């Protein structure tokens, strides 16, 4: 019994280890004075001020500091998402997808903010904004699931997530929403080099359901954005289904002509 449990946990060791660290860090922050919490979060933020002053360690440290409310609100969904990615892609590929999304989206957003501030499109105060958490990495893992989706349903999957993330950018008007879209695209891109995933099973489908719900809440994280993003997502998924049907129909016609 114990050996079986250890063997199962070993399959998701990165997920378990990351979750434990997040719980410890979050529990420690909660016990601190609010002013101290704010200083720690600001120090760990991957904002322009920290990056311009050479605090590149924030690119790593920010992934372990989450200010998204009580841990029970977000940790179960995150664990389901990361565990799904680890079971399908294995530990190393999960870490690659998460790191590429977290670091890549952070740097791309920072470059965009720097250009916007330099041209006066955004106030200089944005350079000191707090920017911590796991959302970029988690969104990249969500995108990295794309090649694992059965080919017939993949266009609907892509259409859904691109529409949800794109709507969040337009409706949310926040640089974090742009980061989520970039992380999603980076995850989709990096996963094309991952090879063949583990086959789907019923427990993995359950994890996918929970992970997808969590992903929507991460990307469309504002109450005013959630409904428009969901509607746009359904439209994007429907468009993906239509594209699949058109391709299948043309392929069927081509086979009929050739025969």
Image (cartoon, rainbow, N blue to C red):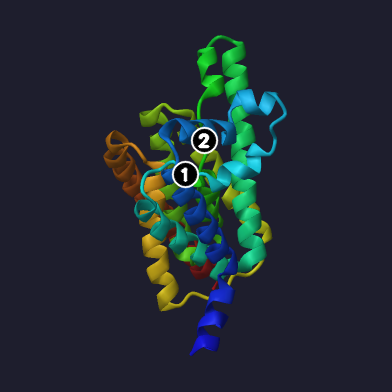
State yes or no: discs 2 and 1 in contact (Cβ < 8 Å): yes
Q: Can residue 111 be seen in this view?
A: no
Question: Residue reaching furthest bottom?
Answer: 1
- Quadrant of the rendering where the C terminus is positioned: bottom right
Q: Name the residue under label 2.
A: 41
Label count reads 2
Compared with 12, 138 (above or below) is: above
Residue 250, x across and y down, in percent: 47, 59
Which residue sits at x=47%, y=55%?
23
Which residue sits at x=65%, y=61%?
93
> Is 126 positioned to the left or the right of 227 in the image?
right
Which residue sits at x=55%, y=9%?
120
User: Is 193 or 105 nearer to us in this picture?
Assistant: 105
Residue 76: quadrant of the picture: bottom left
Question: Residue reaching furthest right?
Answer: 54
How far separated are the C-alphas under marks 2 and 1? 9 Å
Residue 129, x across and y down, in percent: 51, 25
Compared with 216, 41 (above or below) is: above
Compared with 33, 2 (above or below) is: below
Q: Which mark is residue 168?
A: none
User: Is 3 or 187 nearer to us in this picture?
Assistant: 3
Compared with 253, 99 (above or below) is: above
> Is 213 positioned to the left or the right of 152 in the image?
left
Judged from the image, the secondary structure of the residue bearing numbered disc 2 is helix
User: Is 219 or 232 nearer to us in this picture?
Assistant: 219
Q: Name the residue under label 1.
A: 29
């Amino acid at each position: 019994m114990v050996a079986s449990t250890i063997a199962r946990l070993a399959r998701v060791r990165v997920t378990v280890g990351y979750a434990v660290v997040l719980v410890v860090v979050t529990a420690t922050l909660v016990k601190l004075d609010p002013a101290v919490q704010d200083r720690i979060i600001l120090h760990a933020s991957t904002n322009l001020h920290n990056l311009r002053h050479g605090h590149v360690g924030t690119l790593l440290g920010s992934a372990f500091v989450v200010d998204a409310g009580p841990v029970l609100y977000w940790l179960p969904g995150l664990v389901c998402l990361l565990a799904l990615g680890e079971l399908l892609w294995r530990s190393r590929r999960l870490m690659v997808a998460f790191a590429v999304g977290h670091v890549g989206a952070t740097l791309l957003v920072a470059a965009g903010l720097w250009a916007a501030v330099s041209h006066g499109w955004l106030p200089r105060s944005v350079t000191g904004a707090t920017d911590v958490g796991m959302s970029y990495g988690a969104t990249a893992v969500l995108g990295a699931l794309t090649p694992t989706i059965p080919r017939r349903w993949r266009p609907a999957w892509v259409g859904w997530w691109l529409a949800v993330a794109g709507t969040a950018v337009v409706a949310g008007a926040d640089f974090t929403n742009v980061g989520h879209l970039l992380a999603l695209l980076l995850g989709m891109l990096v996963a094309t080099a991952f090879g063949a995933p583990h086959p789907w099973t019923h427990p993995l489908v359950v994890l996918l359901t929970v992970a997808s719900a969590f992903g929507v809440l991460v990307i469309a994280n504002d109450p005013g954005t959630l409904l428009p993003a969901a509607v746009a997502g359904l439209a994007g998924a429907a468009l993906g289904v239509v594209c699949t049907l058109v391709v299948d129909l043309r392929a069927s016609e081509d086979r009929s002509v050739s025969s």
